[in-house]
C-alpha cells in the first residue's frame, strides 16, 4: 500500500527517492517478492480515506500488509486505527531514511501498528519488508486459539449464521479461514 505522492516516484525529488518510477517500483517489488514466494497486490492513493478503505478491505483477503503511508505516516491516526482494527501482520516502509530528516518526520503513527520497519533502503525496502513479514508469520504460526474447520461447533455456526460481523470477527481470529469457506462449511454440516 502506497500513500500520497508515491505515484510521483522517479519525478519527485530523485535525490531522495531515486529515479525509478512508480510502475518500475511495482515491477521490481512484484518480482522480488515472487522470488521469495510472496504473492503481491498493489494499491496507491493520495487520499487518506481511500487508504483506510484499502486496509479495511484487506481483512480476510491477505496474510499481511506492507505500507508506505508517505506523509500520512506522520499525521494519520485514522491509518493507525485501521491497521489496529484489522490486526493483520504489517510492515512499515520508507524509501528515504526518515530518521535523518526533518523533525516533523520523526513520528510514525502507522508504525505503531507495525511489527516490521524498513527505513532508508530505497525501493528494495519493500521486498525486505515482505521477507521479514513472511518470516515472522511463519515463525508465529497460527494463533494459540486457532480452530480448524473441524473444530467448529453448533455455537459458532449459529453465531456465524446470525450475524455477518460474527463471521468476520471469527475470520479475523482464525486467520486463513475465508468468510466464503465458513459459509460453505456451515451449510454443509447443517
Ligand atoms: C516517505 C517519507 C515520508 O516522510 C514522505 O512524506 C514520503 C515518503 C519515504 O518513503 O521515504 O512521502 O514515506
Image (cartoon, grey):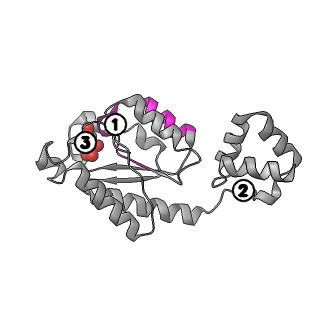
* Residue picked out by circle 1: 45
Please say whether residue 77 is one of the residues in the magenta stretch: yes
Which disc number belongs to residue 146?
A: 2
* Residue positioned 12% across, 48% down in the render: 14
Mark 3 and mark 1 residues within 8 Å of each other at the beta carbon = no
> In the picture provided, is 70 more to the left or to the right than 33?
left
Q: Earlier in the sequence, mark 2 or mark 1?
A: 1
Instruction: Report the image quarter containing ligand 1.
Output: top left
Closer to the eye: label 2 or 1: 1
Mark 1 surroundings within 10 Å by alpha-carbon count, few (fewer than 14), some (14 through 19), many (20 or more): some
* Residue positioned 41% across, 70% down in the render: 36
Q: In the image, which residues are magenta?
A: 66-85
Q: Earlier in the sequence, mark 3 or mark 1?
A: 3
Residue 102, given in percent of the width and then of the height, sits at: 21, 37
**Residue at disc 2, CB closer than 8 Å to ligand 1:** no
* Residue positioned 26% across, 55% down in the render: 25
Specify the quadrant of the image occupied by residue 73: top left
* Depth check, front residue: 127 or 99: 127
Specify the quadrant of the image occupied by residue 108: top left
* Residue picked out by circle 3: 7
Please say whether residue 69 is one of the residues in the magenta stretch: yes
- In the rendered image, the vertical position of residue 138 relative to residue 92, given as above or below: below
| Element assignment for label 1 | loop
* Depth check, front residue: 102 or 143: 143
Residue 43, given in percent of the width and then of the height, sits at: 38, 44
Q: Image quadrant for the N terminus?
A: top left
Q: Earlier in the sequence, mark 2 or mark 3?
A: 3
- In the rendered image, the vertical position of residue 135 relative to residue 9, given as above or below: below
Amino acid at each position: 500500500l502506497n500513500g500520497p505522492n508515491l505515484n510521483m516516484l522517479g519525478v519527485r525529488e530523485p535525490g531522495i527517492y531515486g529515479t525509478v518510477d512508480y510502475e518500475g517500483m511495482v515491477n521490481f517489488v512484484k518480482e522480488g517478492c515472487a522470488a521469495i514466494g510472496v504473492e503481491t497486490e498493489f494499491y496507491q492513493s493520495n487520499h487518506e480515506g481511500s487508504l483506510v478503505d484499502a486496509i479495511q478491505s484487506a481483512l480476510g483477503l491477505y496474510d499481511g500488509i506492507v505500507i508506505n503511508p508517505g506523509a500520512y505516516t506522520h499525521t494519520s491516526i485514522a491509518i493507525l486505527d485501521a491497521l489496529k482494527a484489522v490486526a493483520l501482520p504489517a510492515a512499515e516502509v520508507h524509501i528515504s531514511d526518515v530518521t535523518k530528516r526533518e523533525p516533523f518526520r520523526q513520528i510514525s503513527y502507522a508504525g505503531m501498528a507495525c511489527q516490521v520497519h524498513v527505513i532508508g533502503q530505497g525501493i528494495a525496502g519493500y521486498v525486505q519488508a515482505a521477507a521479514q513479514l513472511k518470516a515472522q508469520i511463519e515463525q508465529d504460526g497460527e494463533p494459540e486459539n486457532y480452530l480448524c474447520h473441524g473444530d467448529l461447533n453448533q455455537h459458532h455456526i449459529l453465531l456465524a449464521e446470525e450475524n455477518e460481523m460474527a463471521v468476520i470477527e471469527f475470520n479475523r481470529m482464525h486467520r486463513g479461514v475465508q468468510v466464503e469457506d465458513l459459509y460453505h462449511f456451515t451449510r454443509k454440516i447443517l
